[in-house]
Image (tube, rainbow, N blue to C red):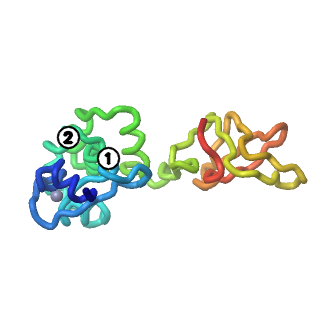
């Protein structure tokens, strides 16, 4: 069965956000890492269009989240959380957001696109798998790394403890490889 067919079955052929029954399509909830039915929702063209184009967001359309935020599916809850976060200055979305409950994994997924954050908070560091990195995390190198300014190479598999994030650039972190403090590219590390 295709993902579309599975989602049609799961949703009863209706938009999982607003309940519309026409122009339905698969929306893969970014960042897409799992894919498949667990990483996707069935949504109508109106919902998908507004999710993807924040400037076209019509707050009233999203009153539907009043119901769909209680979905049993994480992918639906994640999109609901993001839209409520985007709209929270309207007041009522903030109230709904406060009532929502997401498990830690789902909440981290919901936050992964930076929705609802101000521009300067949007610099999000992610490892090779898309997992969010924070100051003080430990990572392991997934690729050999040349240490800048030396002939040293840190081997793949080397652990780097207590990293710090580059506040200006989401692609860089800093950490000590042996005694040397060096800049590391986030896509070459995996959080441990
Ligand atoms: Zn819809």
Foreground mark, 2 or 1?
1
What is the x, y in percent for residue 120? 50, 52
Kindly tell me whether residue 88 is visible in this rendering: no
Q: Residue at x 37, y 38 (%)?
A: 107
Q: Which mark is residue 18?
A: none
45 versus 92 height, above or below: below
Residue 133, located in which quarter of the rendered image?
top right
Which quadrant of the render holds ligand 1?
A: bottom left
Q: How many marks?
A: 2
Residue ID at (71%, 37%) = 159
Which residue extends farthest front? 1
Residue receiving disc 2: 71
Q: Residues within 10 Å of mark 2 (few under 14, many from 20)?
A: some
**Looking at the image, which is closer to me, 104 or 10?**
10
Percent position of residue 129, x then y: 53, 48
Residue 176 or residue 30, whichever sits in front: 30
Residue 41 placed where, x, y %? 26, 53
Residue 162, located in which quarter of the rendered image? top right
Q: Is residue 7 left or right of residue 40?
A: left
Label 1 neighbour load within 10 Å: few <14, some 14-19, many 20+: some
**Distance of label 2 from label 1 (alpha carbons):** 13 Å
Q: Residue 38, labelled with which disc? A: 1
- The image position of residue 116, as x and y in percent, is 36, 49
Residue 59 showing in the rendered view: yes
| Earlier sequence position, callout 2 versus callout 1 | 1
Secondary structure category for the residue under label 1 = helix
* Local secondary structure at mark 2: loop
Q: Is 125 on the left-hand or right-hand side of 24? A: right
The residue located at (80%, 54%) in the rendering is 146
């Amino acid at each position: 069965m295709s993902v579309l067919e599975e989602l049609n079955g799961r949703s009863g052929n209706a938009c999982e956000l607003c309940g519309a029954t026409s122009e339905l399509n698969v929306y893969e909830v970014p960042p897409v890492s799992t894919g498949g039915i667990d990483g996707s929702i069935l949504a109508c063209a109106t919902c998908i269009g507004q999710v993807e184009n924040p400037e076209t967001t019509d707050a009233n359309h999203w009153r539907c989240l009043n119901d769909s935020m209680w979905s049993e599916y994480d992918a639906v809850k994640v999109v609901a959380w993001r839209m409520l976060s985007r709209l929270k200055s309207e007041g009522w979305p903030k109230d709904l957001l406060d009532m929502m409950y997401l498990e830690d994994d789902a909440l981290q997924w919901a936050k992964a696109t930076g929705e609802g954050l101000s521009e300067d908070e949007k610099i999000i560091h992610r490892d090779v798998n898309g997992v969010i990195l924070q100051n003080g995390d430990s990572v392991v190198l997934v690729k050999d790394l040349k240490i800048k300014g030396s002939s040293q190479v840190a081997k793949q598999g080397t652990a780097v403890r207590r990293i710090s994030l580059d506040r200006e650039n989401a692609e860089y972190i800093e950490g000590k490889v042996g005694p040397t403090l060096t800049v590391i590219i986030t896509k070459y590390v995996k959080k441990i």
